[in-house]
Amino acid sequence: MERLERRSKKDQEKKSKNSKVVEITNKNSIKKDFFYAYDEEISAAGSPIQSPRDVFDVPISGTDSDSTGSSSSSSSTPQRVQNGGRSSGGGVVEGGHQWRNMIDALRIKSVRRFSSIPLLAASYEISRKNLRNKLARVRTDNDDENGFDCSLDLDGIPTKPTWRNFSYEDLVAATDNFNPENMIGKGGHAEVYKACLPDGKVVAVKRLMRNEKEAGDKAGDFLSELGIIAHINHPNATRLIGFGIDRGLYFVLQFASHGSLSSLLFGSECLEWKIRFKVALGVAKGLQYLHQDCPRRIIHRDIKASNILLNHNGEAEISDFGLAKWLPDKWAHHVVFPIEGTFGYLAPEYFMHGLVDEKTDVFAFGVLLLELMTGRRAVDSNSRQSLVIWAKPLLDAKQVKEIADPRLEDQYDPIEMMCAMATASMCIHHVSSKRPYMNQVVLLLKGEEVAVDLTQKSIAPRSLLLDACDLEDYTCSNYLNDLNRHKQLIME
Ligand SMILES: Nc1ncnc2c1ncn2[C@@H]1O[C@H](COP(=O)(O)OP(=O)(O)OP(=O)(O)O)[C@@H](O)[C@H]1O
């Protein structure tokens, strides 16, 4: 706790001096020099709490979401979202009632005007099932061909997969000596090559670039990223095939043939709405898996269009786990420095105070949704305007036509667009506790009803950090001011 207070004071001092807290590397990417994290168990009931949150908590109630005022829930600890946040009571996440009314009204109209929607929905379900079967087959193929060892043990239980350790010569042969013609992507930290293994399997080889970092730090980062990707097993996340540690550090990944969402969405051709919506749902499911369903939970911390890849089925895959962190099992304050990520996608509590939990990703997902709906980038490269700042008043006024990408020329499903708008406006809420969890986001996107009481105040002791900036009283205009201030600091 002492440590928390000391750090908090320091942070306050830093904040008050309004020091330039970030520096830019690789366009909008933000890096600082050190990292620390700490956990503090603050279970009121004395039992460990599943969800590592900061003082924000989002208790779920079975009541309608517009119950106002703080709850004096004396009951034990805030619970993790269960059952997809559903309740028999109906309603949507706070602030969602108006959206719900509009979406319902549209639905009624659409029975007449868009009679094909149920059919579309049915075929979508079918194709998802097909895809799941295909993915299962692809995985089995990979198991044989690419070093995955998913064989069954004597009890018929799948053994843990293993990954192939590629020699430098293997990688040179696969990439044609890292031929620049085979380079399919370059980020701030890596070059990615399309490569072909001796059995004909096409893969992506990600070569970490030499940079100013000490060899030890680099190896640590590599191992941390490797550990996280190796842990992940979901159709909406990049799959690891192997790695190389000979003359450099390499990841060998499943190849995503359609490249990054960023190149498709901001490319010369208009990306059709059906694909955009499928991508949104896929990323939401991938994040739900990372945050809530995988054996050790993970926050990605760098959700953005260039880190979403599309595979040959047009299915979205979350990639680049270079900044990802394990979420501790216990309820935790988690403060992270350096503040890393990409400007335009950073949640306010993160860029102002380094506070991080799964809601940091939820905010970034909201920005990604805005990009999908509008066809605009998180930060406009010419005007440097933030998409969140631009979109907020339009979302509040529910201006569907103004939000929708003009290149779509009305070629979009209005119900899906409305659901996406409602979801985005909740995800980019400036107060982290008011944002939905990713399982709720999946339901919201599908237009299903989610009952969540987000109005309760935390029963947990509030940290000095947050008391000082009192996010409960932190208004949207404070947020926009802070965002602008930070933008100016970064651009200076
Ligand atoms: N498995 C893959 N299949 C196809 N293309 C890929 C794959 N992995 C990466 N790419 C391409 O390479 C680009 C850079 O990859 P990645 O984001 O992993 O690099 P990075 O240096 O870690 O990026 P950042 O600057 O965000 O840290 C991606 O945007 C994408 O276009």
Image (cartoon, grey):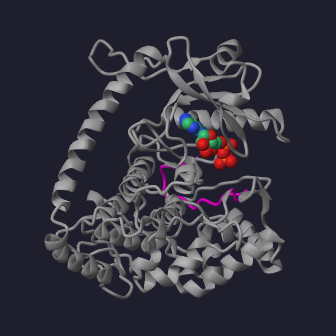
State which quarter of the image contains the C terminus: bottom right
Q: Is residue 108 left or right of residue 230?
A: left
Q: Is residue 297 above or below residue 333?
A: above
Q: Is residue 373 visible in this depiction of the protein? A: yes
Q: Quadrant of ligand 1?
A: top right
Q: Is residue 174 above or below residue 86?
A: above
Tell me, yes or no, whether the highlighted magenta stretch contains residue 53. Answer: no
Whole-percent x and y of residue 234?
Answer: 40, 39
Who's the residue at 60% across and 65% down the image? 378
Who's the residue at 34% across and 87% down the image? 68
Q: Is residue 63 visible in this depiction of the protein? A: no
Who's the residue at 39% across and 78% down the image? 400
| Dominant secondary structure, magenta | loop
**Residue extent of the magenta highlight:** 325-340
Q: Is residue 443 left or right of residue 345?
A: left
48, 205: nearer the viewer = 205
Q: Quadrant of residue 94?
A: bottom left
Q: Quadrant of residue 339?
A: bottom right
166, 214: nearer the viewer = 166
Who's the residue at 49% across and 16% down the image? 147
Whole-percent x and y of residue 342?
Answer: 66, 59
367, 473: nearer the viewer = 367
